[in-house]
Image: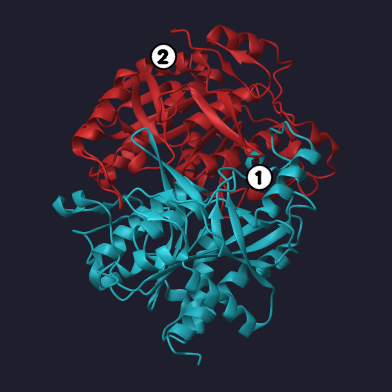
Chain colours: A red, B cyan
């Protein structure tokens, strides 16, 4: 793995590469999900406002204590479909129509529990997934979960890849191609590492070769804060650059190893890493951005593409549960 | 009005204060909604992907040409409630249960049309509302709408205000208290003005004094990119600062004129301004951040608070339509 320049983490840790990641991980005791907030211990009650859950109103250890896999994705409908799909894949008892939205009291996020798997929607963009992750990590902490792996399964624009290709993220990079996430804390900018778990990513690639029914690559994923100007699209309400400017930016991205573009991976990687949670990002590409900006594939084709990360993660989970040898 | 330092806009305009805003506005011909993208004219079809609408598949002028007021807010349920509420307020024919989600083919956003009023959800955070605004502005442009006013009606944390107070935004400021929005375009940072329409804001204040049933103030609104660390909350999964650090930040914000904190106002103001659309932000405060971080009011109290911006904007719309003298 190419060495990265040292990045200063919030929690006084310096990360250089995957070996540091492993050391960091080894230093965490008993694989419990860790919050990094001393104030939480002093609170009588913790209301997870955007989930409509709380420590006084809900028995979180009983509801969630057995969670081992969390899958997150932007769309509420898609995460419901994933819950139903994984229910069938794990051959669990009961009817898939009975899987209910645990957050049904709010429309901010949707959440479904299927055996040891939690499926949650996070909306679009870094701020939206960030709220969800704060409350998810607190939920897993309050529920005393351990040995949890979190997957983001999403959609993305491809950079030099055929539509339908699945990208497992090597490094999550920002719009300047840096493997870091800038978090503003009380008006000051703090830089966090976006290292993901290489072991999980490699296992996912292995799963893809076992399945052998769609192309999967490992590459860098660029995370932007908007869909139009920030990703170099020529079809927004505002656009002040030329086709050549756009292509030059995409070529630069490609040359640094970027293979797809989405809107959540950096903060996802940064928050999971800071809390000692193994994490991976698996996104399908809906188009090749060198060829265009608009998503013109038919509804049925897009639906099939969107199932690919689900199929891959389901295979991973089944292997970990010993359902596939 | 306090003079601001000049801010360089994307479109080669320098804005200093409200008088410049008015000049900029006067310079726009015939009050049509303008896109600032020469590429759009060359496209055979424009697919508004996140709305599941398009120029070839839908007759946008027929569907939306009479729109005069657009109300946007984070929650899909709330924007459906607003559509039903404004239907009753305008005494329109038909049953409120028949108002259907125009974007029902996707779960990214929800959209309801009630006479000349469009009600749309935008999710949480700048990236999420930014995608919606690109597609909304293109929709209004394709539909040849003119003389449109756009309102953001939302919820927020109050800074030195009693819960339930409605804040009409004077200036939308970033987490450094600057009245600007930083947009990344192809890896370069561009700064845009976040000036809102003072005439609309003053009319909204007048509406509140006519209604006389909840407190309304005008003040600056701080827009952050997350709900926890960025807003100085002590109750996230990550927190590295003290209660005193938090209070100092909130006091600084208050001293610069900030009266509430939310997560969408800067990009909302910047994009509407860049496209010559009159815009206002009206958010109710759910708590006073000097007193705490968690939202502990009962469900019924919160529901009533959330109706307040709706009531204010409905009164404004009724006056503009001549339904109230």
Q: Quadrant of residue B127?
A: top left
Nearest to the observer: residue A257 or residue A103 = A257
Q: Position of residue B143 (x, y in %)?
A: 25, 67
Q: Are marks 2 and 1 on the same chain?
A: no
Q: Secondary structure at mark 2?
A: helix
Q: In the figure, is residue B37 to the left or right of B158?
A: left
**How far across and how far down the image is residue A242, in percent?**
21, 39
The residue beneath circle 1 is B231
Asked if labels 1 and 2 touch by Cβ distance under 8 angstroms, the answer is no
Badge 2: few (under 14), some or many (20 or more) residues near its Cα, within 10 Å? Answer: some
Residue A82, position in %: x, y?
47, 38
Q: Which residue is mark 2?
A: A206
Instruction: Determine if residue A277 is in view.
Output: no
Labelled disc at residue B140: none
Q: Chain of mark 1?
A: B
**Snapshot quadrant of residue A232:** top left
Q: Residue at x 51, y 24 (%)?
A: A180
Of A95 and A36, which appears nearest the observer?
A: A36
Q: Chain of mark 2?
A: A
State whether residue A78 is above or below residue B221.
above
Helix, strand or loop at label 1? It is helix
| Residue drawn at the location 50% of the way across and 12% of the way down | A5
Q: Residue at coordinates 18% horizontally, 58% vertically from top-left?
A: B56
Distance (Cα) linking label 2 and label 1 = 42 Å
Q: How many marks?
A: 2
Horizontally, residue A109 falls left or right of residue B11, namely right
Residue B298 place in picture, x, y as percent: 75, 62
């Amino acid at each position: 793995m190419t060495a990265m320049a040292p990045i200063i983490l919030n929690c006084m840790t310096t990360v250089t590469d995957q070996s540091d990641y492993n050391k960091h991980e080894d230093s965490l005791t008993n694989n419990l999900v860790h919050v990094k907030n001393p104030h939480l211990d002093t609170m009588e009650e913790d209301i997870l406002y955007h989930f409509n859950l709380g420590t006084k109103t809900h028995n979180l250890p009983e509801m969630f204590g057995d969670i081992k896999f969390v899958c997150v994705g932007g769309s509420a409908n898609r995460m419901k479909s994933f819950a139903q799909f994984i229910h069938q894949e794990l051959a669990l008892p009961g009817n898939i129509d009975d899987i209910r939205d645990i957050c049904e009291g709010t429309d901010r996020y949707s959440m479904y529990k299927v055996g040891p798997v939690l499926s949650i929607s996070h909306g679009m963009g870094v701020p939206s997934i960030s709220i969800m992750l704060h409350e998810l990590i607190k939920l897993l902490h309050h529920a005393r979960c351990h040995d949890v792996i979190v997957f983001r399964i999403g959609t993305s624009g491809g950079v030099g890849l055929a539509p339908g290709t699945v990208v497992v993220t090597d490094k999550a990079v920002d719009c300047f191609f840096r493997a870091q996430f800038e978090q503003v804390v009380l008006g000051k900018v703090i830089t966090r590492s976006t290292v993901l778990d290489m072991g999980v990513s490699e296992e996912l690639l292995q799963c893809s070769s076992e399945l052998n029914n769609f192309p999967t690559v490992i590459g860098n994923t660029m995370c932007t804060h908007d869909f139009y100007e920030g990703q170099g699209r020529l079809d927004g309400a505002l656009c002040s650059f030329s086709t050549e400017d756009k292509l030059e930016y995409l070529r630069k991205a490609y040359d640094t190893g970027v293979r797809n573009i989405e809107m959540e991976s950096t903060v996802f990687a940064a928050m999971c890493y800071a809390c000692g949670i193994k994490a991976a990002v698996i996104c399908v590409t809906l188009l090749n951005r060198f060829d265009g900006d608009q998503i013109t594939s038919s509804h049925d084709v897009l639906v099939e593409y969107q199932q690919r990360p689900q199929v891959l993660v389901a295979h991973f989970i089944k292997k970990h549960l010993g359902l596939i040898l």
